[in-house]
């Protein structure tokens, strides 16, 4: 079946965070938004057909997942990643960030130390600090255009600061690393030895690129909490459904109790339907999408190499979010942001929103039609060439 990812979709006037809040965010009306981590592609037609059938029935009552839902989720992660679980291991939440916040409250006490690896997805900071936990950072090492883990710093801080939880970003957003199995095993050994619970955000797992296979952390540690969602993979973020694997029954009871305290009841009907349909029928669409995104990455790589060599692409091993190194210009973060906004008329994610370690970097979302990406690169060249 042919899927047309070049077809333009006008998202303006839909309440899109990416497209409809330019002026409210202080951006010029003619800026090209390439920031929020959703895609500009329609969800798989097989999924849309089922959603349209549900809408046509016109009844949106209380709903719970049945066996067919759990089988779709379990088959996806079992067949693609070798991660075997049971239906009872799954806890639904409205999203992965919600799952992280609930995990922080359910599994640690106020004031407890929670570790992250910056520059990292900025809500990680919020779920720790807003829940009155102590933020501990294990900054990634950047050398020769690639990031790695500072294992000595990790173990030292985990020990000295009595870290109780580690939020792992795997694949990593925004730096695009897909951690190798040996890297994850080394992290897991330290965490198990020191009694640190690992909560893994694996929402980008379906975008691990060739030669960089994703290793589900749950294969290495049965006690780990694995947060997943179909939202990135199938562009379903607005339908608010995530699946959290918690094999330890004691931890699972704590997480469910925390959800109850939040007043979370039955999940979104359309979200459940879209999730089940995507995992059951969306494989062919995802294969086509991955091919298209790899071509977008190739275009970005070639353009920067040939026409903007001072902007370095941190080679993405995973995700559709590219991490760009502007440090060769010697500019402050504010200057880079200003030139992108006022000169290039491009709205990217400023590197420092992911932590001070993001100084001199920008994140760009390449999950868009190729014509939009070319326009973005043309704007970038006009401002930063030379």
Image (tube, rainbow, N blue to C red):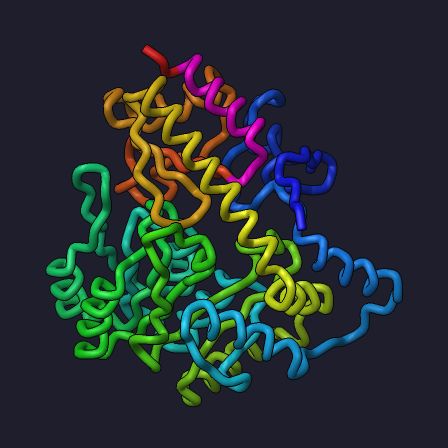
Residue beneath the point at 59% across and 78% down: 70
In the rendered image, residue 366 lying in the magenta stretch gets the answer: no
Tell me how many marks there are.
0
Examine the rendering and report whether any part of residue 150 can be seen.
Answer: yes
Tell me if 335 is positioned left or right of 282 in this view: left
**Up/down of 150 relative to 269, above or below:** above
Residue 138 drawn at (x, y percent): 22, 56
Residue beneath the point at 34% across and 20% down: 306
In the rendered image, residue 371 lying in the magenta stretch gets the answer: yes
**Up/down of 241 relative to 255, above or below:** above
Residue 137 drawn at (x, y percent): 24, 55
In-front residue for pair 180/271: 180
Examine the rendering and report whether any part of residue 237 can be seen.
Answer: no
Q: Quarter of the image for the C terminus: give it.
A: top left
Residue at the front extreme, as displayed: 1
Residue beneath the point at 40% across and 39% down: 322
Tell me if 253 is positioned left or right of 371 in this view: left
The image quarter containing residue 368 is top right
Main SS category, magenta section: helix
Residue at the top extreme, as displayed: 386
**Up/down of 124 relative to 74, above or below:** above
Q: Which stretch did the figure color magenta?
A: 367-383
Residue beneath the point at 46% across and 82% down: 85
Residue 96 drawn at (x, y percent): 50, 63
């Amino acid at each position: 079946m042919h899927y047309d990812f070049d077809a333009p979709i006008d998202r303006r006037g839909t309440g899109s965070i990416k497209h409809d809040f330019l002026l409210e965010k202080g951006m010029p009306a003619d800026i090209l938004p390439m920031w929020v981590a959703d895609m500009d592609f329609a969800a798989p037609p097989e999924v849309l057909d089922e959603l349209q059938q549900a809408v046509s029935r016109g009844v949106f009552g209380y709903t719970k997942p049945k066996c067919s839902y759990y089988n779709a989720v379990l088959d996806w992660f079992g067949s693609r990643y070798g991660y075997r679980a049971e239906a009872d291991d799954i806890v639904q939440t409205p999203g992965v960030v919600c799952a992280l916040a609930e995990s922080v409250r359910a599994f640690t006490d106020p004031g407890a130390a929670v570790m992250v690896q910056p520059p990292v997805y900025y809500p990680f900071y919020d779920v720790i600090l807003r829940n009155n936990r102590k933020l501990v950072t294990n900054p990634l090492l950047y050398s020769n255009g690639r990031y790695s883990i500072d294992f000595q710093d990790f173990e030292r801080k985990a020990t000295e600061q009595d870290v109780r939880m580690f939020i792992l970003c795997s694949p990593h957003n925004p730096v695009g690393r897909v951690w190798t199995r040996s890297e994850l095993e080394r992290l897991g050994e330290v965490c198990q030895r020191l009694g640190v619970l690992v909560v893994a955000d694996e929402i980008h797992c379906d975008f691990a690129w060739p030669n960089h296979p994703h290793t589900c952390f749950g294969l290495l540690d049965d006690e780990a909490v694995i947060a997943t969602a179909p939202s990135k993979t199938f562009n379903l973020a607005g339908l608010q459904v995530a699946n959290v694997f918690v094999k330890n029954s004691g931890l699972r009871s704590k997480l469910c109790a925390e959800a109850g305290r939040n007043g979370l009841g039955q999940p979104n009907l359309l979200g459940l339907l879209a999730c089940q349909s995507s995992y059951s029928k969306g494989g062919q669409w995802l294969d086509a999408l991955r091919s298209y995104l790899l071509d977008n990455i190739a275009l970005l790589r070639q353009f920067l190499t040939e026409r903007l060599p001072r902007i370095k692409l941190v080679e993405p091993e995973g995700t559709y979010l590219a991490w760009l190194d502007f440090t060769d210009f010697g500019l402050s973060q504010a200057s880079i942001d200003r030139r992108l906004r006022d000169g290039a008329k491009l709205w990217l994610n400023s590197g420092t929103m992911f932590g001070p370690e993001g100084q001199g970097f920008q994140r760009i979302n390449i999950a868009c039609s190729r014509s939009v990406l070319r326009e973005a690169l043309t704007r970038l060249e006009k401002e930063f060439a030379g």
